[in-house]
Amino acid sequence: MSQSTLGPAGGSRRALDATVEVLRGLAPESIRDAFDLAVFGLVVAAVVTTGYLQGALSMVVTLPAVLGGSSVVVLQAVVGCLTLSGMFGLSGIVLVGQLVSTGDDRVPRSGPTVTAVVPVHRDAEVLHRSVESLLASRYEDLRVVIVAEPDDESSIERAREYAARERVDLLVNTRYPGTKAGAINYAAEVTESEHLAVFDADERVDPRFVSAAVAKLENCDVVQGRTIPEPDGPIETVAYYESVVLGDLSQRLLTVVTDFTMAASRTVVMRRDAFEAVGGYDPEMLTEDYDFAFACYEAGLDVVEQFSYASTIDGAHTVRDWWGQRKRWMTGYAQVLHSLVRDCFSPANYRSVLSPVICAGSVLGNLFMLSLVSKAAVLVVNGATSWVLLPAATLVGSALALRAYDAHVGRLSGIGVGYLVMPAVLPLYSLAGIKATVEYLLTWEGEWYSVEKGA
C-alpha cells in the first residue's frame, strides 16, 4: 500500500513504527545487553530522583468543612501515600464485595457443547493438572482438545495417553506452529462447538467452573474466571500475593470506571461467535491474552467475571523465573500499547481511543509505583515515617483479606505471613516493568522467556 493511500492516520502509524525501529537500531547486537542495562539504570535513577524531588515539595491542602475547613501544608510525598492507600483501599472494598456476592448456584450438568482447548509446550509434567480436572468437571457436554507443538515429543506422547480416553482429543499444531495463539486458533478452526474455552496446561480447574460459565453465557459473550498461583514456597507465595493484589485488586476501579474487563487466554469460556468476531488471538503478540482483551473491549463484547470457582496454577519457582516471566508480560504490554496507539489514529469508536489510555496505565504505572519508594524516603528523612505505614498497612491488609477469603472457601490451606512482603513486591514488579519497556523500545526482537514448570 502506498503512502498516498494510507492518508494522515496511516502516515502517523508508519511514523510511530519507524520511530520504534530506529530506537531499536541504536544498539548493535554485540552490546545490546550493556546498552539496555545502561538505559534501564538511567531511567530508574531519573524516576527515583524525580520522585524524591517531587515528594519533598510542599503544598497547601484545604480540609473539608467536616474536618474544620482549615488549610494545612503537607509534603507531596504525603499525597502520594494517600493516593496509593485510597486506590488500593477502595479497590479492596469493591473486590471483597464482588467475591462474597458472586455465588452462583446455577451449575447445569448439560447444555451446549464446550470445547476446552489446552495448548501445551514443554508441559508434559503438568498436563495432568488441566486434563484430569477438566474430566472431573460437572459439565457433561465438555470435550478436551490438547494442542501440542510439532517439536514437543514429550508433550505429544503424554497427550496421546489422555487421547485414548473418552472426551479427549489430540491436535498437533502443524497449521500455526510456534505460539499459544496459533494453537488456540487452530483448535477453533477444526472444531464446531457452540462454546470455546481455553485453559493452561498447569491449571487445576474447579469442577463447577465450566457449568457456571455456561449459565452466564446465556446473557453475555465471554466469561473470565479467576486464577491464583499456588503459594507452596517462598517465591510461589510472592507470585500469589502479586497476582491477587496487582491482578485481581488493581483492576477493580478500572473495571467500574471504564467497563474494561480482562478476557485472557486461560480460565475463559466464550461463545464461538464472540471469538470469531475479534478474529481469535493474534499470534504476533507476546501477550496474546492482553491483546485479545482489548479486541473484545473495542468490539463491544460483554465480558463477565466469574469469581466463585477459581483455578489454581503453578507459580514461578525461582527468582530467575519470576523476573523473566514478569519481564515477558510487561514486554507484551508495551507491544500491545504500541499497537493500540498506532490504531487509535483511525478509531472505530470511543473505546479505540480509550484503550491506549487504559493500557498506558499498566505500562507507565510502574514509574509511579517506583517513585513511591523515593517519596517514602522523603517522609523518613523529614521524621514523618508514620505516613509510610498507611499505604503499607493498606497493601498488607488487602493481601491478608484476599488470602483469608481463599483459605475460607477451601482453595488454599492456612494463611501464613507472606502478606507482610507485599509492600516490597510493588517496586520489584515496577523494576521488571521498566526493564521490559526499555528493552521493547530499544532491542527486543521477538524473543520470550519460558519458565520451568514442576510436576
Image (cartoon, rainbow, N blue to C red):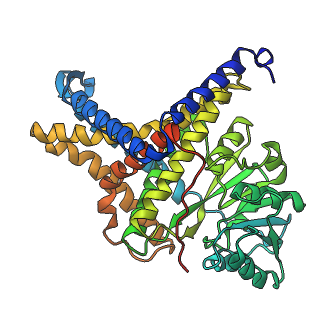
The percent position of residue 121, horizontal first and vertical second, equals 66, 68
Q: Is residue 341 left or right of residue 53?
A: right
Question: Quarter-wise, where is residue 310 in the image?
Answer: bottom right
**Depth check, front residue: 64 or 228:** 228
Q: Is residue 174 left or right of residue 86?
A: right
Q: Where is 45 relative to 323, above or below?
A: above
Q: Quadrant of the C terminus?
A: bottom right
Q: Is residue 403 left or right of residue 391?
A: right
**Depth check, front residue: 187 or 58:** 187
The percent position of residue 220, horizontal first and vertical second, equals 75, 48
**Depth check, front residue: 261 or 146:** 146
The percent position of residue 277, horizontal first and vertical second, equals 82, 43
Question: Quarter-wise, where is residue 72 in the image?
Answer: top left
The percent position of residue 185, horizontal first and vertical second, equals 79, 55
Q: How many marks?
A: 0
Residue drawn 64% across the image and 51% down it: 289
Residue drawn 62% across the image and 49% down it: 286
Residue farthest along the left direction in this orientation: 383
Residue drawn 45% across the image and 51% down it: 246
Question: Quarter-wise, where is residue 174 in the image?
Answer: bottom right
The reply to whether residue 90 is visible in this rendering is no
**Depth check, front residue: 205 or 127:** 127
Q: Where is 450 relative to 300, above or below?
A: below
Q: Where is 392 relative to 146, above or below?
A: above
The reply to whether residue 103 is visible in this rendering is yes
